[in-house]
Image (spheres, rainbow, N blue to C red):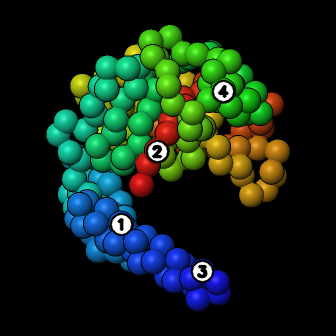
Amino acid sequence: MKIECLFLVRRRAFFLSVVVALFASAYGYAAGEPAPTPKTGQTTSYGTADDGALQKGQTWPNPRFSDMGDGTVFDTLTGLVWMKNANCWGTMSWSLALTKVADLNSGTATCTGYVGGQNDWRLPNVSELRSLIDVERNGLMLPIGHPFSSVQTSDYWSSSTVADPVSSAWDVNFGSAIVDDAAKTFDYYVWPVRGGR
């Protein structure tokens, strides 16, 4: 019995390593290496060797976003699936945002335009939310030609809590591209996401 269990554990570990290697090679990096950091979108240079001049990072696919036709949008750069409607429920506190996303997963909440059927929606972390911003642009900070609807030029909650004080969480403003922290009692917008690398 002990030998059979050890065999199963080793077989699962081997299978997992093969899956990871195949996944990594499909996206152009070796297993064990970190995922590449995407470019910021800045193409204008304001100084020698600044971001606009060097443009370091993973090149954005073209098109970057793919409308899935079910009320969701696939980000081909990050592998994330976003709710197409970026304003499902208006503004709310951080804890209510977590509850609302849980309700979406259980089927007790919905979002206009979303067909449904997925139960692994979550509040994005601050890096995921920030990845949507094209720093080359002013005003609405999403890349040109994005398929999202009802995006607000205001603050959106992330799932990331601030280290000190833990009564605050990180948010991203899609009007100014500012990443900031706010008390979890503030009312901000919610943009559900699922998947990712």
The disc, 2 or 1, on the residue closer to the chain's N-terminal end is: 1
Outermost top residue: 112
The disc, 4 or 3, on the residue closer to the chain's N-terminal end is: 3
Is residue 113 visible in the rendered image? The answer is: yes
Query: Viewer-nearest of labels 2 and 1?
Result: 1
Query: What residue appears at the point 58 percent right and 88 percent down from the top-left corner?
Result: 3
Q: Mark 3 points at which residue?
A: 5
Q: How far apart are marks 2 and 1 (CA)?
A: 16 Å
Does residue 82 appear to the left or right of 90 in the view shown? left
Question: Residue 106: which numbered mark, if any?
Answer: 4
Q: Quadrant of residue 37?
A: bottom left
Q: Do the residues labelled 4 and 3 touch (CB within 8 Å)?
A: no
Total residue callouts: 4
Q: How far apart are marks 2 and 4 (CA)?
A: 17 Å
- Residue type marked 4: Ser
The disc, 2 or 4, on the residue closer to the chain's N-terminal end is: 4
- For label 1, count other residues whose C-alpha is less than 10 Å away and answer few (under 14), some (14-19) or many (20+): few
- Residue type marked 1: Val
